[in-house]
Image (tube, rainbow, N blue to C red):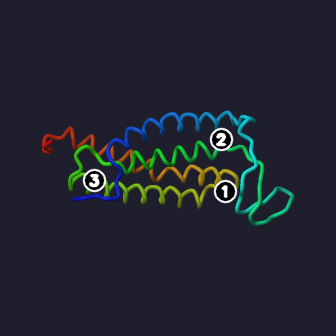
Amino acid sequence: MKANYLFPNKFKRIGWLILIPSAIFGILMLIFNYEPAFLDFKVPAIFVNEFFGDKYFLGMVRNNILNEIIGVLTIISLLLVAFSKEKTEDEYIYKIRLESLVWAVYVNYGILLFCFLFIFGGSFLWVMVFNMFTVLLFFILRFNWKIARLRKSSDYEK
């Protein structure tokens, strides 16, 4: 089966090399609320909603861009890891990939439905922030777990 939508296998290694440090740094940044002053810039915004201030479309706002840098690196690296070909990409691996993606979407939205019902206010904002990453994370975890089990089984020919 030809999967045209997948990145070449070498992109998986690049994805892991970006994902691990960006995820660690992102978690540390959240825990310690780290925002270095040298990353404060005026950036374009599509919608501006200032606290106790104006609301308008298309403007410039002062923002620390560390969150955006970490978020972009994490999303790009998750995509590279999740959607890079395996060294041997056959129909069975394609089936595992598809099943893992469907499973990840079901689990992700099941958790999100639970959070809609039982988490409120500012805490729900954090749920939505993490939700940007979890569907890809769940997919990567399940896909790699299934591939590892496949490689350990004696039925799979290399």
Where does residue 49 sit, x and y in percent of width and height? 78, 60
The residue lying toward the viewer, choosing from 62 and 143, is: 62
Q: Earlier in the sequence, mark 2 or mark 1?
A: 2
Residue type at tag 1: Phe
Asked whether disc 2 touches disc 3, contact meaning CB atoms under 8 Å apart, the reply is: no
**Which circle, 1 or 3, is nearer the viewer?**
3
Q: Which residue is mark 2?
A: 66
The residue lying toward the viewer, choosing from 69 and 34, is: 69
Where does residue 84 sit, x and y in percent of width and height? 35, 48
Q: Residues within 10 Å of mark 2 (few under 14, many from 20)?
A: some
State the image quarter where residue 47 is shown. Answer: bottom right
**Which circle, 2 or 1, is nearer the viewer?**
2
Q: Which residue is mark 3?
A: 96
Residue drawn at point x = 38 percent, y = 38 percent? 13
Q: Which mark is residue 120?
A: 1
The residue lying toward the viewer, choosing from 53 and 69, is: 69
